[in-house]
Amino acid sequence: MGGTAMALLYSFRSVMAVFWRNKKSLVGLIIVITFVLIAVLAPYESPYNPTGFSTGPAWQPPSLAHPMGTDYVGHDLWSQFVWGARISLEVGFLAGAMVQILGNTLGILSGYIGGKVDDGLMRIVDIFLTLPTLPLIILLIVFLPFHGPLVVTLVIVITSWAGHTRNMRAQSYSYRERDFILAAKASGYGSLRISFSEIFPNILSLAMAGMMYSIVAAIGAEAALDFLGLASGNTVSWGTMLYWAQSEGAIINGTWWWIVPPGLALALIGFGLVMMNYAFDELFNPRLRVL
C-alpha cells in the first residue's frame, strides 16, 4: 500500500513538473481548475436560488449584494453563473470522455482487425461524417421525448464519435505490421490485448489531444443548444444565460454584465483546455519528452 502511494505521489510530481516547465499549459491548468472549483463549490458560493423568485431590483449592475448584477426580473446572475458552470462542465467533460472511449475502442480495433469489420465500420463512419452535425443535433433534441443535460450529452456523443474513430483507426492501421506488433501476435496475444496494451500506449498523445478538443467541442455544442432555446427549462447553464440575455434585449439595454461573464467563461475554458494539451503532448509523446 505504501509503495503504491509513493508511486502515485511520484507520478503526480512528475506530471506537475511538466506543467510547471510549460508555462502555457500551467496557465491553462489554472484556468480549468478555477472553473472546476467554481462548479464544485456552487452550493457554497451561490447566495440565491438561480431559478427561484426575484432576489433584487431588475437590471441592476454589479454590486456587493449582486456581484454580477441582476437580470430583467431581478435574478442574481452570480448564482446563475456558478450553477451554470456545473451544467456546462458536466456535459462537456462527460461527453468528451464518452466520445474518446467510443472513438478509441472502435477506431483501434477497426484499424488492427481490418477486413470486413473495418470496412463495415468505416462505411458507418462515412455516413455520420457526411451528415451536418449541428442540424442533426437539433433534430434529435427536438424529437426526443426527454430533455435535460444527460440527453444533451448522449446526443453530442452520437453525433461526434465518427471523426475521432477515423483518426484512431488510421493510427492503429499504421502500427499493425510493425515488428513489435507481429512479435506480440506470434506470442499468442489476442486482438484486444494487442490493441490496448501494444498499440494504444503509442498513440496516447493523440488520444489526449482528442480528449481536450472533444471537451471543448462538447461545451460549445451544449452552449449552442441552450442559446437556441433547446435546453430543459429547469436547468441553468452559461448557454441559457446567453439565451435569456438575447431574448430580453440585454444588448439593447447595455446590460453587459449579463452577456460578458458567460461568454468570457466559454472562451476561457476552451482556451485553458487547449493550452493544457501542450503538457499532455510532452507527457505522452516520447519524442517531446524532456529527461
Image (cartoon, grey):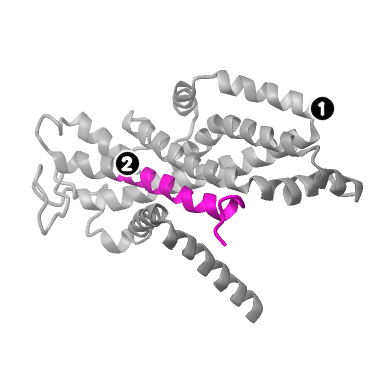
Residue at 27% across, 40% down = 263
Instruction: Give the camera-side residue of 160 and 213.
Output: 213
- Do the residues under discs 1 and 2 have CB atoms within 8 angstroms? no
Q: In which quarter of the image is the N terminus?
A: bottom right
Q: Whole-percent x and y of residue 229?
A: 33, 30
Answer few, some or many: residues within 10 Å of disc 1's Cα (few below 14, many 20 plus, some between 14 and 19).
Answer: few
Whole-percent x, y for residue 246 in the image: 21, 30
Residue 154 sits above or below residue 189 on the image: above
Mark sitting earlier along the chain (1/2): 1
The stretch of residues the image draws in magenta is 265-291
Location of residue 99 (image quadrant): top right
- Main secondary structure of the magenta stretch: helix
Q: For the residue marked with disc 1, what is the amino acid?
A: Gly
Residue 72, can we see it? Answer: no
Where is residue 21 shown, x and y percent of the image?
43, 60
Report the quarter where the C terminus lies: bottom right
Q: Where is residue 228 in the image (x, y as percent from the top left)?
A: 33, 28
The relative height of residue 239 versus residue 31 in the rendered view (above or below) is above
Q: How far apart are marks 1 and 2 (CA)?
A: 43 Å
Q: Does the magenta stretch include residue 46?
A: no
The crowding category of the residue bearing disc 2, from other C-alpha atoms within 10 Å (few below 14, some 14 to 19, many at least 20), is: few
Is residue 105 found left or right of 234 in the rendered image? Answer: right
Q: Nearer the viewer, residue 9 or 53?
A: 9
